[in-house]
Image (tube, rainbow, N blue to C red):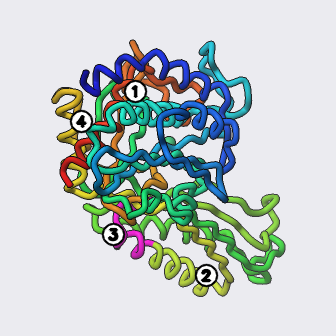
Amino acid sequence: MSIRDDAAALQGDLVQLRRRLHLEPELGLQLPRTQEKVLDAVEGLGLEIALGGSLSSVIGVLRGAQPGPAVLLRADMDALPVAERTGLDFAAQTDRMHACGHDLHTTMLIGAARLLSAHADKLGGDVVFMFQPGEEGYDGASHMVSEGVLEAAGSRVVAGYALHVVSMLPAGTVVTRRGPMLAASDTLCVTVRGAGGHGSTPHRALDPVPATCEMILALQTLVTRTVDIHDPVVITVGSIHGGTQHNVIPDEVQFEATVRSYSRQSHTQIKNGIHRTLRGIAEAHGLDVDIDYTDLYPVTVNDPREAEFAAATATELLGEDRFQWAPHPLSASEDFSRVLDNVPGAMLLLGAAPNGVDPESAPTNHSPLVTFDESVLASGAALYADLAIQRLAMC
Ligand SMILES: [Zn+2]
């Protein structure tokens, strides 16, 4: 039997497992119920199991029949603080929801563990299964890298792969690209400090409002005048707060922005440019400014050769019509970037638009209405498994 046939035979089990995970979403770095379900599901597969210290991760190592290097397969497991409105009969009845499809990732990686355990004779090396909490803003991958996931098999893995379902791509379609795949995402929180006063006598005050307006516009000019248009940056100011009423000059104004970039070079450039611009405008107006710039996730960069390999594997396994190169990176971000900063590998998107819905108009990942086509579970499990088998065969 081929991996694909074996995976198809698991489909019913995978759907049930996915629904059990979907019913009980958990947030952040501690996912005890999810961890329990993963441990139950991989019991008897012959994996060496290690649990996280600072988070409820699960690392499984499968030893292949022949000695060789190790490769890593990653699934994230956490949900979002979104109240589900899908109306599905297995919808979560809490204020949390698997609105990014991480329940599918966890299920597919368990499927891959079952397939690879049954085909361990075909493995020329070891497979590290990385079941990760805290992708949604908690940097769970970074915790797992610190706790040694990359060396879990005894030596550093030679490659790492992750799949992510997307509700707006046709079900079963695999998409990736060489080089930058997802954006770096940073947050900017700014407080502009002046001295409040009466709106009729601004010369007796230090008004932070006009200077804040200048700053926000200058950030947009900074993007268009200093950044290479072929290496784009996005700055969106999503929040601005200051003052109480029309005739009172406030002491301070605050604003917050998200900053997205697609290369390490533009990341450094825009970060420095933001500090310089904001300080310069504040100084010009005799104001103080506090700049709190936080690097969240770095740019997710696919190794070009690993992306080629993953594309060839997906095409061979699923058919040419099921694979597409992404024309440009996505502006979302991912902490799988922490793995790809350390070892070569690739992140792949797996289309999962719900059956009968135009992918273009399907509710997006993170929406309370998002649904995913469960028919992709078997394909995803087979793809994870085949990436490991084929990559180890190349070593
Ligand atoms: Zn996600």
Identify residue for label 2.
Answer: 282
Report, in whole angstroms, how far the alpha carbon at label 3 lies from the one at label 1. Answer: 35 Å
In primary-sequence order, the first of circles 2 and 1 is 2
**Residue 134: % across, % down:** 60, 50
- Location of residue 344 with respect to 62 vertically, above or below: below
Q: Circle 1 — which element? A: loop
Identify residue for label 3.
Answer: 227
The structure residue drawn at horizontal position 57% and vertical position 55%, both measured from the top left corner, is: 140
Query: Can residue 364 be seen at all in this image of the molecule?
Result: no
Q: Circle 3 — which element? A: loop
Q: Main secondary structure of the magenta part?
A: helix
Q: Mark 4 packing: few (<14 Cα in 10 Å), some, or many (20+)?
A: many
Tell us which disc is closer to us: 2 or 1.
Answer: 1
Identify residue for label 1.
Answer: 352
Specify start and end residues of the magenta stretch as a single range. 260-270
In primary-sequence order, the first of circles 4 and 1 is 4
Report, in whole angstroms, how far the alpha carbon at label 3 lies from the one at label 4. Answer: 35 Å
The amino acid on which the numbered mark 3 sits, given as a three-letter code, is: Val
Report, in whole angstroms, how far the alpha carbon at label 2 lies from the one at label 4. Answer: 53 Å
Are circles 3 and 4 on residues that touch, CB within 8 Å?
A: no
- Location of residue 349 with respect to 338 vertically, above or below: above
Q: Mark 2 packing: few (<14 Cα in 10 Å), some, or many (20+)?
A: many
Q: Mark 1 packing: few (<14 Cα in 10 Å), some, or many (20+)?
A: many
Q: Quadrant of the N terminus?
A: top left
Report, in whole angstroms, how far the alpha carbon at label 2 lies from the one at label 1. Answer: 48 Å
**Residue 222: % across, % down:** 42, 71
Residue 314, disc: 4
Q: Circle 4 — which element? A: helix
Identify which residue, 88 or 42, lies in the foreground. Answer: 42
The structure residue drawn at horizontal position 25% and vertical position 61%, both measured from the top left corner, is: 230
Tell us which disc is closer to us: 3 or 1.
Answer: 1
